[in-house]
Amino acid sequence: MRSSDFLFRLIKALSKGDRRNFKLFARLQEGDKKYIQLFDAIDKQDAYDEKKLLKQFKGERFTKQFSVAKNYLYNYILRTLDIFQSDPHADLTSLIHKIEILIGKNLFDQAEKLLKKAKHIAARQERFGEMLELLGHERMILDKTRKVKEYHAFIGEIQAYELKTLDQQTNVLQYLHLYDEAYKISKRSISARNEEDAQAIKTILLDPVLKKENALSTRAEIIRLGILNISYRYQHNFKKCLEISQELIQTYENHPHILKEKNDSYFSALRNYGIILYQIGNTEEALDILRKLKEAKAFNEQEKIRVFEDYYIFKIGACIENADILEGIKAIKELEKQLPIYQPKLMKANELMLYYFVSYFYFFSGRSQEAVSWINKILNEPKTELRMDIQCMARVLNLLVHYELGNKDLLDYNMKSVYRFIANRERLFKFEKTILKYLRALNNIHPDEDKNEILSEFGKSLDQVLQDPFEKKALNLLDASRWIQGKLTGQTISDIILLDQIEKIKQS
């Protein structure tokens, strides 16, 4: 990320309410208002262009020290966000500040009264860092106001409470560090494609801290369940994942004071639970979760963004699972209308996943031309190590799309670069190698050769590769087996999925 466009990206991340509050606050202030004009000029740009800005404001004094002017505007925007934006921690933070003011003025009895209220909030919300701070203030008040006997009577209670709180805070950090390890693995790939990653997740699951009795607080329990959820989902252990997801959602809902602060994590838990329900065929309950997610109450801009991400990843993923073409197209049209508002604020990993789901939906339903623009959103993404599984598979999907479109020269030109890209990121598994090998053969087919013979050989080779459970997991991102079947029978992947579903119903 370039520091030169920090201001541009901050402005683009603002909601309509944020912009309104900025203008309102700025107009109430005295002094030069040129920075409002600079704000508007940057806001109108689709991509940051400093030369254009300098030309537009030629002759203005602030252009002589433009970096200073940008820094002033940047900090001014942050100041308005700080003033106007709601914060679930605000009440407790404000109370602690008032307590410190009263202690500073030696109004210890008044500070003590507020301290009792603050400790109650901190205990209810499990805010261990703030609780340690409050206990420090309580020790100071005790030191300043109590006689020796009283001091000895109460200091032991404070010390015991501090040690307990410190244990709870350390326990939360212990879980957070383990969560970081699981999250790091899961963001490289949707599932293990090699023994090393599979073993890394197994090692995490064997950690004794994950036993339920070792969680010393609700916060720790939520993180514990989150680690298990990520790990079982990575292993495709859907039975365990469903159990843990239900427990995680219930834990959030049973603790509204923590839920309000962790609402975006709750939305993600709903999304993951719903997707698993689809994957095991429980469509009716999955739809209930989808409706629950769509109707979920977001308390701030960040939570609205999470709901947007989670809902459309869930919705389009569900349409792929069910081969529901009409509903999928409808969902994508809705997404396209809202995307310009949300796109600058999306989490990069979720953004890549969303783009891939849309491009794959169009591909598997036989709409390759529509898939191109969405795949390009991934291919044109600035360098990032996030969701490397999606970045690599998107390049394979892009080759298949151009094969479908008959872009023979473009396909031939891109084949080597795709191979290098995947190989350099250590994701050139047998599944990818097989697709690249036979796609090259299909693209360079001799007029006397039978395309169906190559496709049949392709299918047999891929079936052999998919005997390996690690390789089989690639089908979660690209069902090449059904694509080959479709090329042999003149069907789309979605047609084949529907026929398979009908066959299952007949057999049941």
Image (cartoon, helix red, strand yellow):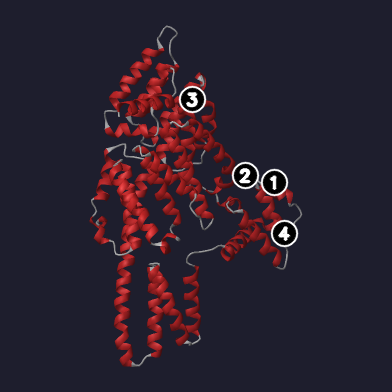
Residue at label 2?
A: 47
Determine the CA span between mark 4 and mark 3.
53 Å
Q: Is residue 288 above or below residue 453?
A: below
Q: Is residue 231 visible?
A: no
Report which quarter residue 209 is drawn in. bottom left
- Percent of width and height locating residue 35: 69, 59
User: Tag 3 or tag 2, which sits nearer the N-term?
Assistant: 2
Q: What residue type is disc 4 on?
A: Lys
**CA gap, disc 2 and disc 3:** 33 Å
- Residue to which mark 3 is pinned: 366
What residue is drawn where x is 37% and y is 60%? 254
Tell me the kind of residue under disc 2: Ala
> Which is nearer the N-term, disc 1 or disc 2?
2
Instruction: Give the residue number, with chain letter if any, for mark 1.
Output: 52
Provide the secondary structure element on which disc 1 rests: helix
Q: What is the three-letter code of the residue carrying label 3?
A: Gly
In the rendered structure, which disc, 1 or 3, sits on the residue that comes first in sequence? 1
Compared to residue 275, the image places residue 147 above or below, namely: below
Viewer-nearest of discs 1 and 2: 2
Gap in Å between the C-alphas at discs 4 and 2? 21 Å
Position in image of residue 446 (x %, y %): 43, 10
Q: Residues within 10 Å of mark 2 (few under 14, many from 20)?
A: few
Picture residue at 31% right of the left edge, 39% below the top:
192
- Viewer-nearest of labels 1 and 3? 3
